[in-house]
Image (spheres, rainbow, N blue to C red):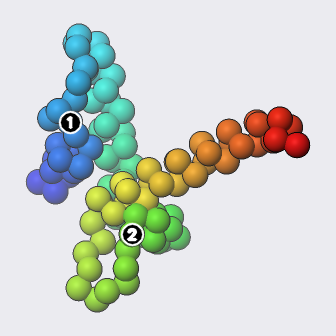
Amino acid sequence: MEEFFRLLKAGLGLESFPVRGLSRIRKGVAVLLGLAVFLWEVRRSGGALEGLLLRLGGKLGIASERDGPYLLLRGLVRLLNYEVTKEALEEEEGSFG
């Protein structure tokens, strides 16, 4: 449980959330909680998605390396950046040629 809250506070930046207004804070916390639960479940279940996110997050394959939620988070951000970039390039494909 402590690791989950540490992920929320330090990994996802809940403590320094720059939002004003109670409804916006609630929405922001809900999104961060959803993201934290998603990463937690990916880590708990293992499988191909966990392996992909860990590799994208910078896993080196060293025996002493810990597969924590921060590597998963970094990998998820890189995967989302890739998808957004790919989509933008596909939309602009006609204007390059």
From the viewer's perspective, tell me whether residue 97 is left or right of residue 20.
right
From the viewer's perspective, tell me whether residue 15 is left or right of residue 78.
left
Element on which disc 2 rests: loop
Residue 37 appears at what percent x and percent y?
Answer: 33, 47
* Comes first in the chain, label 1 or label 2: 1
Nearer to the camera, 45 or 75: 75
Residue 1 appears at what percent x and percent y?
Answer: 15, 53
Q: Which mark is residue 28?
A: none
- Vertically, is 4 above or below 91? below
Element on which disc 1 rests: loop
Q: Which mark is residue 58?
A: 2
- Vertically, is 19 above or below 44? above
From the viewer's perspective, tell me whether residue 35 is left or right of residue 21.
right
For the image shown, how many numbered marks are present on the structure? 2
Question: Is residue 61 visible from the viewing direction of this image?
Answer: yes
Q: Which image quadrant is residue 71 in?
A: bottom left
Residue type, mark 2 in image: Gly
Q: Quadrant of the C terminus?
A: top right
Residue 12 appears at what percent x and percent y?
Answer: 26, 43
Q: Of all residues shown, which one is farthest toward the bottom?
A: 63
